[in-house]
């Protein structure tokens, strides 16, 4: 007889926050099993395919034996140069491709790893909530303590930096911010970025700005890069992703730019854990960054049409909802008498429409739900029609 060993999870895994979407996932599977014609507005993943020219470039690059070997750790210089050029063109920000650009296996990878570079046990990371769940989890994995910065409607979903207690500030080393914001779809003003930069400089805190949605914007109002503000490069970095901009979530490519010391630290972690991005994907990334404006406009127009259908519909039904200026999400208060989960369950059960409960992104999201604009306009109209009958 062989003895079966007992396998116990590490404390850091045991301490992971509960997966709040588990109950919803179960309900969703149940609905699908029952044959419900489900309209799934819970998915933060573009339904539109990657533009053809990018796929073509990938097909060619795959055949090049030079790409079949280990890639360089920090990313091909040609990819980092393409990033620097894109930044200059899009934001008029100058970057040194050698020291101020780092390639990532998707921005989630970089966000997940950066606390390992700068956080010692007991150090504090300032984390927005509701927010992308990777910020608190990455903090936890590094042995850090997350301090929640609530994002509330009254403050336009911007953190109240002045409300952070002095004792917390003394231990804070890093701050995550994310605009255009998932899940609230809020955008940040120049004023907020300036305030955040002053705050970071005063307290020696590294700003990590997640700009994954900078290119998904509406009505021609382009969101800013935090690096456009004077002093930004002195205090922080910005994470970008090709996932949302070019419908490339499956390809796993992103990048971080800005403060060279912060990027050096993140690079140190990465060289010890991963071996970079498949170079054929980096070539496809170079191609993506040179995508012509009309192609991108078409993607934005597609989301904008869907936004207008859903926003208009919800508004007519009396929802307390803000018109998103960016991201492919719509964040709305649940009607009176419902909490987040209760309302999501109600809509799934009665209308076959699935949203995401706001509290799944953190306690301050309770009472809200998030709809993703990742279904075609026709389905979105159908969703609005069904919602109209049950709210
Ligand atoms: C989608 C998303 C990312 C991660 O995208 P990658 O595919 O890992 O590049 C990062 N931040 C936010 C807020 C997102 O919604």
Image: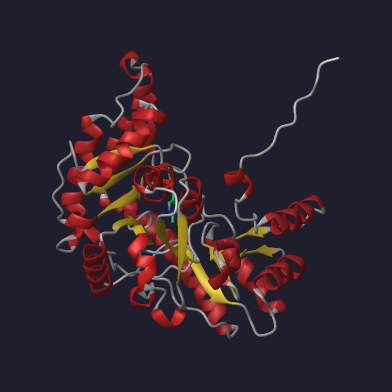
Above/below status of 192 relative to 210 = below
Q: Residue at x 58, y 86 (%)?
A: 318
Q: Where does the image place residue 91, in percent across and percent down from the top left? A: 19, 57
Q: Camera-side residue: 156 or 247?
A: 156
- Quarter holding the C terminus? bottom right
Q: Is residue 71 visible?
A: yes
Q: Is residue 306 visible?
A: no
- Quarter holding the N terminus? top right
Q: Is residue 85 left or right of residue 291?
A: left
Above/below status of 110 relative to 37 = above
Return the residue found at the far right.
1
Q: Camera-side residue: 74 or 15?
A: 15
Q: Is residue 246 left or right of residue 222?
A: right
Q: Camera-side residue: 357 or 366?
A: 366
| Res 24 → quadrant | bottom right
Q: Residue at x 67, y 64 (%)?
A: 353
Q: Residue at x 34, y 13 (%)?
A: 65
């Amino acid at each position: 007889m062989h003895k079966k060993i007992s396998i116990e999870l590490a404390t850091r895994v045991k301490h992971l926050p509960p997966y709040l979407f588990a109950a919803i996932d179960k309900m969703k599977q149940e609905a699908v099993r029952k044959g419900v014609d489900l309209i799934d507005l819970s998915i933060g993943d573009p339904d539109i395919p990657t533009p053809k020219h990018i796929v073509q470039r990938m097909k060619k690059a795959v055949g090049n034996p030079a790409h079949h070997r280990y890639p360089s750790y920090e990313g091909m210089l040609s990819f980092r140069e393409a990033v620097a050029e894109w930044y200059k063109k899009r934001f008029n920000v100058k970057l040194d491709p050698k020291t101020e650009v780092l390639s990532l296996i998707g921005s989630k990878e970089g966000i997940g790893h950066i606390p390992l570079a700068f956080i010692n046990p007991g150090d504090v990371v300032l984390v927005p909530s509701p927010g992308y769940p990777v910020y608190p989890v990455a903090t936890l994995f590094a042995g850090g303590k997350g301090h929640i910065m609530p994002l509330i409607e009254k403050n336009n979903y911007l953190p109240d930096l002045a409300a952070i207690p002095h004792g917390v500030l003394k231990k804070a080393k890093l701050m995550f911010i994310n605009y255009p914001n998932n899940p609230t779809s809020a955008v940040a003003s120049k004023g907020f970025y300036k305030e955040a930069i002053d705050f970071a400089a005063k307290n020696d805190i590294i700003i990590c700005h997640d700009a994954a949605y900078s290119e998904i914007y509406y009505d021609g109002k382009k969101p800013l890069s935090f690096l456009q503000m004077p002093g930004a490069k002195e205090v922080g970095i910005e994470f970008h992703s090709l996932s949302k901009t070019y419908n490339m979530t499956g390809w796993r490519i992103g990048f971080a730019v800005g403060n060279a010391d912060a990027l050096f630290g993140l690079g140190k972690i990465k060289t010890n854990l991963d071996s970079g991005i498949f170079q054929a994907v980096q070539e496809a990334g170079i191609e993506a960054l040179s995508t012509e404006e009309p192609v991108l406009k078409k993607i934005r127009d597609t989301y904008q049409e869907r936004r207008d259908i859903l926003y208009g519909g919800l508004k007519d039904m009396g929802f307390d909802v803000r018109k998103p200026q960016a991201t492919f999400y719509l964040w709305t208060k649940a009607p009176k008498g419902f909490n987040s989960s209760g309302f999501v369950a109600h809509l799934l059960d009665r209308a076959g429409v699935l949203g995401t409960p706001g509290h799944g992104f953190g306690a301050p999201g309770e009472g809200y739900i998030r709809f993703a604009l990742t279904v075609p306009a026709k389905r979105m109209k159908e969703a609005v029609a069904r919602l109209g009958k049950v709210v």
